[in-house]
Amino acid sequence: MTEHGKRMTQPKKVTYSISQLVPYINWRYFYYAWQVTDRAERRRLRAEAERLLGDMDGRYHAYALCLLAEAYGDGDDLLLNGERLPLLRQQHAEKGKPCLCLSDFVRPVEQGVPDTVGVFATSVDRSVVTDSGHDDYQKMMAQLLADRLAEAAAERVHEQVRRTDWGYAPNERLTVEQLHAERFQGIRPAVGYPSLPDTSVNFLIDRLLHLADIGIRLTESGAMIPHASVSGLMLAHPEARYFTIGSIDETQLADYAGRRGLPVELLRKFLGGMVAHSTTAKPL
């Protein structure tokens, strides 16, 4: 709940060159994807990846869309520029701690004073992967680098939002290592991750951002194509933190479906294994 910067009625589009994003790449996840722990092999892989990134520079780009929306928390929903974004709440918190929902970190509508929430998406030219040929190793290398570049674009646009566009942390000066350790104020929960696990939320984000403007299309479940894409929210509350929604019960599923205005069975399909199989519904 920080009053800085200007809210937006339309999303801002940013285009990044590959070289602008290379410093923001989190190589730890690159190594993890290859399942490589040997230091010498990591150095070899990174050297090869950096050569390929150098070849990509100028030929391909990454893109970001960002919207600073007027926001209110309304129970387990967010209101963003008048659009309702229903969310899920934890049902099994740590002992002695409240069950959290992302809307908890946004000023409630009852106060009558608007807050701000950032909505974002990033993507990378699909041709990064399609131009890599038919060699399985090269295709995997290209895909993993595209994934890292999409995440790097999210890191960079969030930094700019905090320091300039929203401006709630104008004096922030963090190293890349500190950025990757999330030492900044606020959080950036991404769709499909534990705090925001329902990929069909992308249909609602699309209403706000027009994802096709950066080449993203959505599958029937809300998954993004190309795969090298990231979407989510930016929350500035100094106490905002990540958490895991975990499993939900039939009562919350029905409540969530009602707030989304969608059939229960369709939401059950979207949420998959998150819905606990139980004959006894627990209270919200």
Image: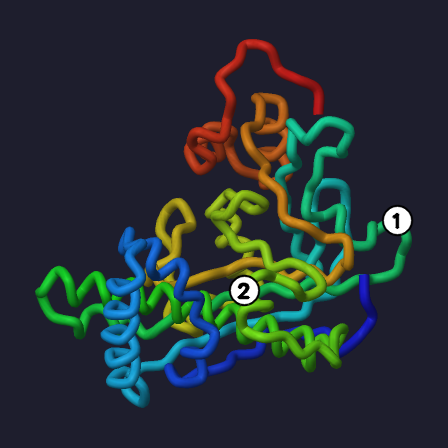
Q: Residue 176, image x and y in percent?
A: 54, 73
Q: Residue 207, image x and y in percent?
A: 54, 61
Quadrant containing the N terminus in the rendered view? bottom right
Q: Is residue 140 left or right of residue 88?
A: left
Q: Residue at x 70, y 59 (%)?
A: 82
For the residue labelled by badge 1, is the local secondary structure a helix, a strand or a loop?
helix
Tell me the CA gap for discs 1 and 2: 35 Å
Q: Residue 261, image x and y in percent?
A: 58, 39
Q: Residue at x 32, y 74 (%)?
A: 125
For the residue labelled by badge 2, is the local secondary structure a helix, a strand or a loop?
helix
Asked if disc 1 and disc 2 are in contact, CB closer than 8 Å, the reply is no
* Residue type, numbered disc 2: His
Could you say which is closer to the camera, residue 68 or residue 18? 18
Pointer 1 residue: 110
Q: Is residue 131 above or below residue 255?
A: below
The 10 Å Cα crowd at callout 1, few under 14, some 14 to 19, many 20 or more, is few
Quarter of the view holding residue 120: bottom right
* Residue type, numbered disc 1: Glu
Q: Looking at the image, what colour scheme do you see?
A: rainbow
Q: Residue at x 59, y 37 (%)?
A: 245
